[in-house]
Amino acid sequence: MKRDSFSLLVAIVFILMLGIIMALSIALSSQSLEQTAKTYLTEQSQLLAKSATEYAILAAQGHDFSTSCLNSINLSFKSLYDVNITIHYLGNNLPPGCNLLNNSISTKESNLTMVIDTKVYIKEGTNEGVSFFRRTLQKL
């Protein structure tokens, strides 16, 4: 009888230890999955910021600066990301209404230089707190 009760006690302890190991394994697996998803969203937002900056440069190159400036661009991507692009200018004799950092640049080569601020963030309603900011200096 003593032998059977000891075997039962060992079996219960073994099952408890196995349950604890399985619970830790599941917790680690879910944490790893969450980190992988956040890394994916971060990488995607960085690539989106680069593409949006190139789009802003293309839009500025096609803009007529004789009467106005292109100050901001707002984009949406896959109904998950919002992209806000703000453009500030360095130059000489720029039209009124521009986001100016300096309007008294004396060298011809530095005229119409843009500082492009690109902000990428996930829209409201998602539980991921991923955002990315990129600043680019570009000469037109």
Image: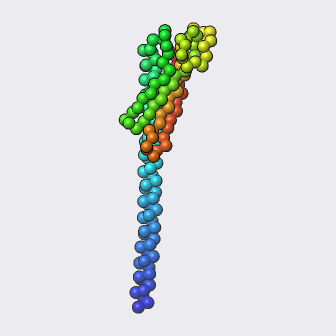
User: In this rendering, would 13 be left or right of 101?
Assistant: left
Where is residue 139? Give x, y as percent.
52, 16
Depicted 130 relative to depicted 91: above or below: below
Judged from this view, the residue extending furthest toward the bottom is 1
Depicted 125 relative to depicted 119: above or below: below
The residue under the point 44% across, 60% down is: 25
- Quarter location, residue 94: top right
The residue under the point 45% across, 71% down is: 17
Q: Is residue 15 visible?
A: yes
Judged from this view, the residue extending furthest toward the left is 78
The residue under the point 55% across, 19% down is: 99
Q: Nearer the viewer, residue 82 or 14?
A: 82
Q: Which color scheme is applied? A: rainbow
- Quarter location, residue 78: top left
Depicted 119 relative to depicted 20: above or below: above
Where is residue 51? Give x, y as percent.
43, 28
Q: Nearer the viewer, residue 68 or 106?
A: 68
Depicted 23 relative to depicted 54: above or below: below
